[in-house]
Image: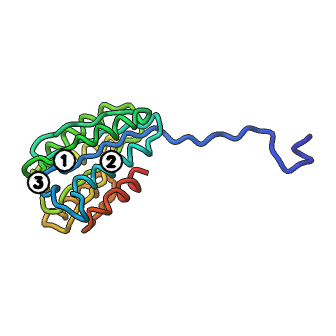
Amino acid sequence: PVEDVLPLTMDIPTRLRMPAASVVVVIDISGSMAAIEGGRSKLALAVEGAQRIAALLRDDDELTVIPFDNEPGFVVGPLPGSRRDQAIEQLNEVEIGGGGINMRDALDVASGYIRATDRPVRHIITITDGSDTTQQEGALAIVRGLNEQGVTLTSIAIGSGEHVPFIRDMAAVGGGRTFLTERAADLPNILVNEAE
C-alpha cells in the first residue's frame, strides 16, 4: 500500500557487480626502452603505468607484469588487488635488459599465467617499441588461441617503427585495441584507461 501512495518501491534493487578481472602486462625491457624522454626512461614510464593499474585494482582482481626482452625478467605476480602495495613496490625492481623483445616467447609466458587464473575476465596488454618487436612468427597463432578461450589482447606501440603493422595485427586478432604513441609520457594514462 505504501508503494501505491508514494513514489518509491519497497524492493531492494539488485546490485550490479562487475566480474573479477585478471590483467597481464607484458613490458618490453630491451635496450631501446632505456631511451630518455623528459628526464625519464621509456621503461620507467611503462612501469609507472603498471603501478597505476595496480592502484586501481579491486581486491578480487589480479595483476601479473612480465618484463621481457630475449627472456622474461623479474615477474611481478600474479597478485590480487588486495596486495596492490606489494605489486607497486615490486615493480620498482624492473630493470632494463638486453636485445629485442621475443614476442612469441613473451606471449607464451603470458598465456601460461592468463590460462592459470580463475578470474572470468582475462586481458593481456603488451607494451613494445615500434621497431623492436622480434620473433613474430607463431605469435599471432598464440593470440588467436587465447582469444578463442575468451582472452583479449591490447597492444601499445611506442614510436612508429617498422613493426607497428604486426603490433596492430596482434590486437586485431586478440579482440583488443592498438595504441600508437610517439610520446612515452602518454604510457601511464593509456595503461590506466585500457585497464579500466
Query: Looking at numbered disc 3 in the image, what kind of residue is underneath it?
Result: Gly
Residue 103 in view in this figure: yes
- Residue 177, given in percent of the width and then of the height, sits at 33, 58
Q: Nearer the viewer, residue 15 or 181?
A: 181
Query: Looking at numbered disc 1 in the image, what kind of residue is underneath it?
Result: Ala
Q: Is residue 160 above or below residue 123?
A: below
Q: Is residue 54 above or below residue 178?
A: above
Residue 138 in view in this figure: no
Mark 1 and mark 3: Cα distance apart in space: 27 Å
Mark 1 and mark 2: Cα distance apart in space: 26 Å
Cβ atoms under marks 1 and 3 closer than 8 Å: no
- Residue 5, given in percent of the width and then of the height, sits at 92, 47
Q: Which of 52 and 147 is in front in this view?
A: 52
Query: Looking at numbered disc 2 in the image, what kind of residue is underneath it?
Result: Ala
Q: Mark 3 points at which residue?
A: 31
Cβ atoms under marks 1 and 2 closer than 8 Å: no
Q: Is mark 1 on a helix, strand or loop?
A: helix
Q: Residue 141 carries which label?
A: 1
Query: In which image quadrant can residue 188 be found?
Result: bottom left
Q: What element carries label 2?
A: helix
Query: In which image quadrant can residue 109 be found?
Result: top left
Q: Tell me: 147 left or right of 159.
A: right
Q: Name the residue under label 2.
A: 50
Residue at image point 25% right, 43% down: 145
Q: Nearer the viewer, residue 109 or 56?
A: 56
Question: Looking at the image, is mark 1 or mark 2 earlier in the sequence?
Answer: 2
Query: In which image quadrant can residue 63 be found?
Result: top left
Q: What element carries label 3?
A: helix
